[in-house]
Each structure stands twice: as structure tokens, then as C-alpha cells.
Amino acid sequence: MVKSDILAGLDIGSGKITCVLATHEPKDDLVKVLSASCVPCKGVKGGVVVDIPNAANSVRAAIEEAEEKINEIVGEVYLGIRGYHIESFNNRGAYNIARTDKEITADDVASVIDNAKAIKITAEREILHIVPQGFSLDKQKGVPNPVGMEGSLLEVNVHIVISASSHLNNLVKTIGQAGFKVSESVYNLLGLGEIVVTPEEKDLGCLLIDIGGQTTSVGIYYDGTLQFSKEIPIGGDYITRDIAYGLGTAMRTAREIKEKYGAAISSLVEDEMITVTSLDRRTQREIRPRDLLDFIQPRVEEIFSKIDHALQTSGYSDLCRNGAILTGGCSLLKGMPEACQQVLDLQQARMGYPAAEIVDCPQEYMTQEYLTAIGLACYPFFKNSYTEYSTSHKSPLGRTVLRWFRDLLNA
């Protein structure tokens, strides 16, 4: 029988699919991770499905493996969305209170957000998220919750995330073919931000960087909310491919060498020799770990240079100089925080892990491999909700708005 109180977060990457099953503990207001699984993924490239049957088989294997560990069955998943097809930008909406009674209601706030999302997009695109960044009432900025206040002009700034409809639909079809439903489609970066970025970091300004296999997600937080996000079409698989090509070996071997011996900066390179098996597996040779720098360093610099370019063109680069939080498998490469700090000229850079006051997670799942899926499973129960207003699959606007106001009024 399907357990309705178990939340399933599903992260579909280009090389692997990760599933996390969790439940909400009302007493402590924590999300407790129950089980997780990670299986190889076929049929997905750069966050986009290219082969639905193969991708569906991988999805089914990942979810069923997680189910078996706790002997439970789930029916729906919170589906993570990432990839170069995602775009985002900020917009502003205004709403005049024409009534004699000038008290702001929940309907007024819903109306001003509706006005903010009144944008022109092509038929091939659709709005995935609308995240309110802050309200103004009669030109007075910095109003966190206008409900109950009086005024004539209500304004809001929002961050809008849009996705290619075809890619989103193909992902939903993949989940359906695997035998499951999509509770909601969630931009990966939003889920990650809620479990790895502290409220203080969000307020003072910071940079969140999630380096996946083929894409890198970047978000800038300031004044308590997400100000900027962008998908960059480069990731850790580019480093792996460079090593495989340069050493004449298989991608699997190159990935193992990168993870065991690779480093982003020369001071962290080890001395032991590395045995490399040829592509045809007939011969072996030895190389020095320092030789890997010729393949790794240029790509690491390229990744962070592309991030820096995105920041410089965003208009928000000065807001994140306090530091960066790194997530994703490639962030585990030795020296990545130091390289990030140096190339982006930041005060500090650290690895991102789930905050203990939000997530109760077994140590075996407290790794970058499961981090995004944990964020997706936590999505409905964030302790400090980022007040997201969503139009994503299986998530009616009214339900999301009511939940948002319920959280505000109970805060």
C-alpha cells in the first residue's frame, strides 16, 4: 500500500539517478531521511531526456531500491529539474487597492504576484517557479508580509524560472512510464538552497554553485532571498572526458582516477604513481599525479571563469563577495573551494551539507551524491519557507499560495 506521508525526492542526472525517501517529524519540525539509492542513468543528457524507455527503467530501479530498504511503497515524487533549457529573470508587479477598505488581504497579494508573472514567453516555454523577493506598500520597501496592513499601492519583486515545455513533459512522461506520478517539478537549485545555505548567508549575500556532470547551476542570495540564478552548460564530465582523451583510457577509468588522485590546485597533488589502463584494456602505463593537472586545471578555471562571467553580467556580482557554497559531485575534487575562492575573488568558499536543524540524515547519505535529492524530499516542509509561488506540474496555484500564506501567518 502506498504511504502518503513519505516524500520522495528524485534527482535525474546525466550519469546517475538518485532517490531519497523522507518523512516530516512535526514534533521537531525536521525532515527525517529514511532511505536513499543511486543507480546509473541511461537516456538523459544535460538534464534532458533523450531516450524515455531507458530513462524510465533507471527511474524505476532507483525508486524501487529506495523502497525496498524500508519496505514501503511510494506513488509520487518531487522531480528535480536542471539543465541548459532553464532560464530565469526578475520582474516587478503592482496592484492598486481600489476598495474603501484598504486592508491588504491574501487575495491582494495573490493578485500582485499574478501581475508580476504577466510576461510574454513563447509557446514552447512555461513558468516553473515564481519566487517573491520582497513587497512594497505605498512605495515603502522592505515589507515582508503585507497581509493585514493598509495601503493603496501594493508592489512585489519576483524571481521567475522558466523551462522548455517539451523537456519538462518528457521528464514527466518518463516518471509516468516508470509507474509513478510527479507531485511537483522543482528547480534543483531551490531545494539545495534551503538545506545548505544558512539564513545569515542569505541575508548578507552569498553564492550557491552546484556543479553537475554536464551543467552547473549558479544562484545569488541576498537580503534573505534568491536574487539571480543561471544554468551554465559545463560540468564535471568535461574534466573526466579531458582526462580520458589525454590518457587514452576509458571514461570509467578516467572518472576513478579523477576522484582518487585529481586536484584543482598543485599544492594538493600527491606523490604516488598512477597506473593507467589503455582504452583497449591490453596495456598499462604509469603517470605522475602532477600530470593530471594539465587536464584538470584548465577545465576548473574554465568552469569558474564562466561562472564569473555570469556574475559580472548579472548585475548582482557585488552581493555575493562574502563567500560561496559548493555542491555537486565535482565539488569533491580536492582544492575546489580554494580554486573557487581564488578565481572568483571571494572572501571564502565552503562545501555545502544539510543543516542539522532542518534535516535528520543518516551519515551514509550525508554526501554530495544524495544532497540534491535530499533537498527535493525536503521541499514541502522547509522550516523557513522561501515563499515560492509555483505553477509547476501537479501543483495548483491556489494550493501553493494558501500554503505560503498559512506559513506567513503562523510565523
Image (cartoon, grey):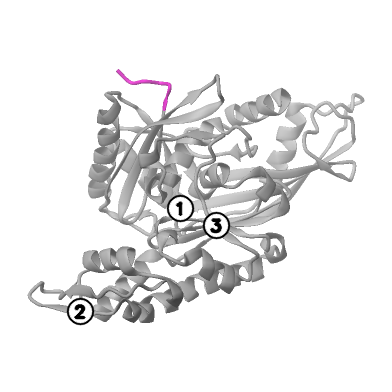
210 or 272, which is in the foreground?
272
Q: Which residue is drawn at 44% across and 40% down?
A: 374
Amino acid carrying label 1: it is Arg
Residue sticking out furthest to the left: 282
Q: Which residue is drawn at 65% across and 70% down?
A: 313
**Residue 396: image location, x then y, percent:** 55, 31
The residue under label 2 is: 286
The residue under label 1 is: 82
Q: Residue at x 31, y 64 (%)?
A: 260
Q: Nearer the viewer, mark 1 or mark 3?
A: 3
Instruction: State the SS at label 2.
Output: strand
Question: Is residue 250 something one can see in this rendering?
Answer: yes
- The span shown in magenta is 1-6
The Cα atoms of the two marked residues, 2 and 3, are separated by: 33 Å
Q: In which quarter of the image is residue 57?
A: top left
Instruction: Please determine whether, in this image, residue 406 is positioned above or below residue 140.
Output: above
Amino acid carrying label 3: it is Arg
Q: Earlier in the sequence, mark 2 or mark 3?
A: 2
Q: Is residue 161 left or right of residue 158?
A: left
Residue sticking out furthest to the front: 271
